[in-house]
Image (spheres, grey):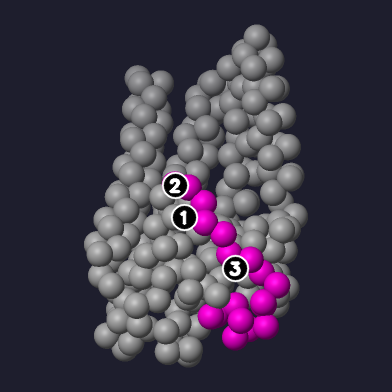
């Protein structure tokens, strides 16, 4: 009876995690597409927005390039390059301005030596190693029994949780910087601030949702390990 109840709980947690992530993804996609058709009053493309903010902050050395895909935008701190998806790079919409400014926000963090960004950069190879090693050991542990596999999964999720926890302030701070720069440099009008905020907040939701999903996965693994002991 107890086993059936715990099994039901773990399944429920799994479904909740999927729903949370799916809703967040739907929200960011929906807000992005809605504001993708709203033309910026200044009529500046994402590339132009990013370039203006970078130049005003003495970051002329940072390049901006166009990459394939949708919402594939990111800042590469090692190569000092901001990569914007084709639509964000070329279009002059609210979404393009918001996303481009957000990525510049990461470049500003890099320039200022933002502590959480430094910690995240340090954790990247550590988390990658734990993940790859975890998959390898997990396959081997399957031969020895379920408990060994679950414990390895627990370590992997904990590493992922730590990384996501550090990522949250990095992303939220980048959005904060983006909004401040857009307003300070008069790249957006007062009437556009609300929509820019919606785009930036929607993007932040995906990181929060991923963190919540990992927490639920951690709880599932703990329940399964305790159940296996019984």
- CB of mark 1 within 8 Å of CB of mark 3? no
The answer to whether residue 63 is left or right of residue 72 is right
Q: Position of residue 185 (x, y in %)?
A: 48, 89
Q: Is residue 133 left or right of residue 4?
A: right
State the residue at coordinates (35%, 82%).
Answer: 42
Q: Upstream in the sequence, badge 2 or badge 3?
A: 2
> Are the two marked residues, 1 and 2, in contact with CB atoms closer than 8 angstroms?
yes
Q: Tell me, yes or no, if residue 224 can be seen here.
A: yes
Q: Which residue is mark 3?
A: 106
Please tell me which of labels 1 and 2 falls first in the chain. 2
On the image, the x and y values in percent for residue 65 come to: 57, 59
**The quadrant where residue 9 appears:** top left
Residue range in magenta is: 52-69
Count of number-bearing discs: 3
Q: Say which residue label 1 marks.
A: 85
Instruction: Residue 129: name its quadrant.
Output: top right
Of 81 and 30, the residue lying toward us: 81
Tell me residue 52's x, y (percent).
Answer: 53, 80
Q: Position of residue 166 (x, y in %)?
A: 61, 59
Q: Residue at x 34, y 77 (%)?
A: 43
Q: Is residue 27 magenta?
A: no
């Amino acid at each position: 009876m107890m086993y059936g109840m715990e099994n039901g709980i773990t399944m429920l947690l799994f479904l909740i995690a999927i729903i949370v992530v799916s809703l967040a993804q739907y929200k960011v996609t929906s807000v992005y597409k809605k504001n993708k058709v709203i033309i910026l009053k200044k009529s500046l493309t994402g590339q132009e927005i990013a370039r203006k903010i970078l130049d005003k902050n003495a970051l002329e050395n940072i390049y901006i390039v166009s990459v394939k895909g949708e919402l594939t935008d990111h800042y590469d701190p090692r190569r000092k390059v901001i990569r914007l998806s084709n639509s964000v790079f070329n279009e002059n919409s609210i979404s393009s301005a918001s996303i481009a400014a957000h990525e510049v926000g990461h470049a500003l963090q890099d320039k200022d030596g933002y502590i959480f960004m430094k910690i995240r950069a340090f954790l990247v190879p550590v988390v990658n190693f734990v993940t790859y090693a975890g998959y390898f050991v997990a396959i081997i542990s399957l031969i020895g029994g379920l408990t060994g596999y679950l414990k390895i999964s627990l370590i992997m999720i904990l590493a992922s949780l730590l990384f996501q926890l550090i990522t949250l302030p990095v992303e939220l701070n980048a959005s904060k910087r983006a909004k401040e720069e857009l307003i300070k440099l008069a790249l957006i009008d007062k009437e556009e601030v609300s929509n820019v905020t919606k785009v930036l907040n929607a993007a932040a939701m995906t990181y929060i949702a991923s963190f919540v999903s990992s927490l639920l996965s951690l709880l599932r693994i703990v329940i399964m390990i305790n159940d296996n002991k019984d």
